[in-house]
Image (tube, rainbow, N blue to C red):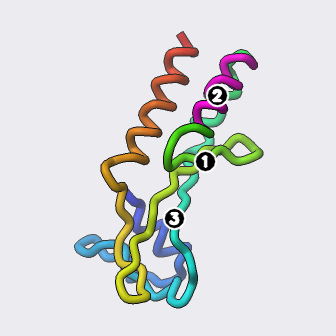
Amino acid sequence: AINRQALNGMIGHVNALRDNCPLTTYAFYGCPLNTLKISFPRALSERMERLPRECRLSIEQRVHDLRRLELTQDGNILACFPLPRRSSVLDTVEDTNDETAESLHQVLQLISFHEL
């Protein structure tokens, strides 16, 4: 689930994201933004850092091959949500066919496997 309070703070409009409505804002009006990238808590990257180098490299390569995830140069993992456009306003954030969730699940399984 999206942390609406945090996103409201980032967008700078206290009521842009109400609990009873989808992500709706004019903050990106006219912007060619087509993907929303959300960083996962540092704890996930720290779990990877504790793994042996060969295990970490294996997981990093897998992240590069997975849809809707990105690995930054500093080791953070980003979930990438496509932003469908209707008119020219950002209406909703969708995880089409749960692709982002499935990719993240695979990374968590890999990390857990290597931690054993």
Tag 1 and tag 3, C-beta contact below 8 Å: no
Between 34 and 77, the residue placed more toward the observer is 34
- Asked whether, in this view, residue 87 is left or right of residue 37, the answer is left
Name the main secondary structure of what is drawn in magenta: helix
Tag 3 and tag 2, C-beta contact below 8 Å: no
Q: Which mark is residue 48?
A: 2
Q: Give the mark nearer the N terminus: 1 vs 2.
A: 2
Q: Which residue is mark 1?
A: 70
- Mark nearest the camera among 3 and 2 is 3
SS assignment at label 1: strand
Check disc 2 and give the amino acid type.
Answer: Met
Q: Which residue is mark 3?
A: 36
Please identify the quadrant where the N terminus is shown: bottom left
Check disc 1 and give the amino acid type.
Answer: Glu
Q: Is residue 43 in sight in this rendering?
A: no
User: Does residue 43 show up magenta in the picture?
Assistant: no
Horizontal and vertical percent for residue 48? 64, 28
Horizontal and vertical percent for residue 44? 57, 35
* Residue at 61% in and 47% down: 70
* Residue at 39% in and 72% down: 84
Q: CA distance from mark 1 to mark 2?
A: 14 Å
Q: Which residues are magenta?
A: 53-63
Check disc 3 and give the amino acid type.
Answer: Leu
- Asked whether, in this view, residue 94 is left or right of residue 72, the answer is left
Q: Is residue 7 above or below residue 30?
A: above
SS assignment at label 2: helix
Between 13 and 29, the residue placed more toward the observer is 29
Label 2 crowd (10 A; few <14 / some 14-19 / many >=20):
many
